[in-house]
Structures are given as C-alpha cells and as structure tokens.
Amino acid sequence: MYIMNKHFKDAAYYARRAATHAFYGVRETLEPVETRVRRRLGYEQPEPESRVETLVSEAKAVEGEARNRVAGVTRWFRSS
C-alpha cells in the first residue's frame, strides 16, 4: 500500500510542476499581446523602478527629512 501512495504523491508533484511551467509558458507567450492590448486601451503599466532608482529616491526622501529636522532644531535653538 505504501508504494502506491508514494506513486500518487510523485504524480501529484509532477502534475503541479507541469501546470506551473505551462502557466509561465503561456504567460510569457502572451506577454507581447497583453502589452499591445494595454497600450491600445490606455492601461499601460509603468515600468518598475530599478534597484538603483529605488535607493536613490529613498536616499532623497531621507535627506529631505533630515533637512527638515535640522531646520526645526535650529529654529528651536534660535528661539531659546
């Protein structure tokens, strides 16, 4: 009985794996079509930021916050 159970587990694993690969294959094949349809309907997805762009924007946000805090502390010391 154990041997059959193992075979069913193996079959289920390979079926899931095959379905996942089929999904990715269809998705990759239809990607150009999806892009054309989105472009024509006006639903273009923005390009994702690269890691460098994300880090630069985060650094600028932190820099702006630091400037605001320093300005606040400077005003506080001057008013004291």
Image (spheres, helix red, strand yellow):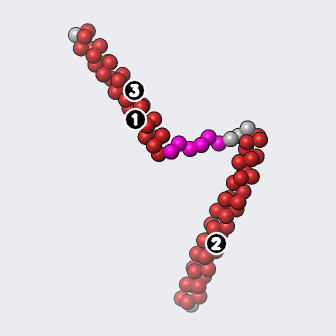
Looking at the image, residue 35 lies above or below residue 67 = below
> Which amino acid type is shown beneath numbered disc 2?
Ala
In this rendering, which labeled residue sits more in front, label 2 or label 3?
3
**Does the magenta stretch mainly form a helix, a strand or a loop?**
loop
In this rendering, which labeled residue sits more in front, label 1 or label 2?
1
| Gap between marks 1 and 2 measured at Cα | 43 Å
What crowding class fits label 1: few (fewer than 14 Cα within 10 Å), some (14-19), or many (20 or more)?
A: few
Label 3: which residue? 64
Taking the image as shown, residue 54 lies to the left or right of residue 37, namely: left
The answer to whether the residue labelled 1 contacts the one labelled 2, judged by CB atoms less than 8 Å apart, is no
The question of residue 49 being in magenta is answered with yes
Residue nearest the observer in this picture, 64 or 13: 64
What crowding class fits label 3: few (fewer than 14 Cα within 10 Å), some (14-19), or many (20 or more)?
A: few
Residue nearest the observer in this picture, 67 or 12: 67
What crowding class fits label 2: few (fewer than 14 Cα within 10 Å), some (14-19), or many (20 or more)?
A: few
> Which amino acid type is shown beneath numbered disc 1?
Ala
Q: Position of residue 16 (x, y in %)?
A: 62, 71
Please report whichever mark, 1 or 2, sits nearer to the chain's N-terminal start.
Answer: 2
Q: Which mark is residue 18?
A: 2
Question: At 67% across and 67% down in the image, what residue appears?
Answer: 22
The answer to whether the residue labelled 2 contacts the one labelled 3, judged by CB atoms less than 8 Å apart, is no
> Which amino acid type is shown beneath numbered disc 3?
Gly
Label 1: which residue? 59
User: What residue range appears in magenta?
Assistant: 45-50
Looking at the image, residue 8 lies above or below residue 72 = below
Q: Secondary structure at mark 3?
A: helix
